[in-house]
Image (cartoon, helix red, strand yellow):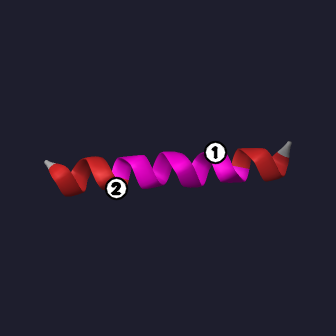
Amino acid sequence: MFYFSQINVSCIKAKIHSYFLWT
C-alpha cells in the first residue's frame, strides 16, 4: 500500500509539473 501510494504521488507530481510546463 505504501509503495503504491509513493507511485501515485510521483504520478501526481509529474502531472502537476507538466501542467505548469505547458501553461
CA separation in Å, label 2 and label 1? 14 Å
Answer with the quarter of the image where residue 1 lies: top right
Q: Which residue is drawn at the image coordinates 13% and 48% (left, top)? A: 23
Q: Residues within 10 Å of mark 1 (few under 14, many from 20)?
A: few
Residue 1 inside the magenta-drawn segment: no
Q: Which residue is drawn at the image coordinates 22% and 57% (left, top)? A: 21
Residue at numbered disc 1: 8
User: Mark 2 belongs to which amino acid?
Assistant: His
User: Mark 1 belongs to which amino acid?
Assistant: Asn
In the displayed structure, does residue 19 sit left or right of residue 5? Answer: left
Which residues are the magenta region? 6-16
Q: Position of residue 11 (x, y in %)?
A: 54, 49
Q: Position of residue 10 (x, y in %)?
A: 57, 55
Dot 2: what SS? helix
Dot 1: what SS? helix
Q: Which residue is drawn at the image coordinates 27% and 47% (left, top)? A: 19
Q: How crowded is mark 2: few (under 14 residues within 10 Å), some or many (20 or more)?
A: few
Residue at numbered disc 2: 17
Q: Name the magenta segment's main secondary structure.
A: helix
Which residue is situated farthest in the left direction here?
Answer: 23
Which residue is situated farthest in the right direction here?
Answer: 1
Q: Reading the chain from its start, which is encountered first: label 2 or label 1?
A: 1
**Along the viewing direction, whichever of 13 and 22 lies nearer the viewer:** 22
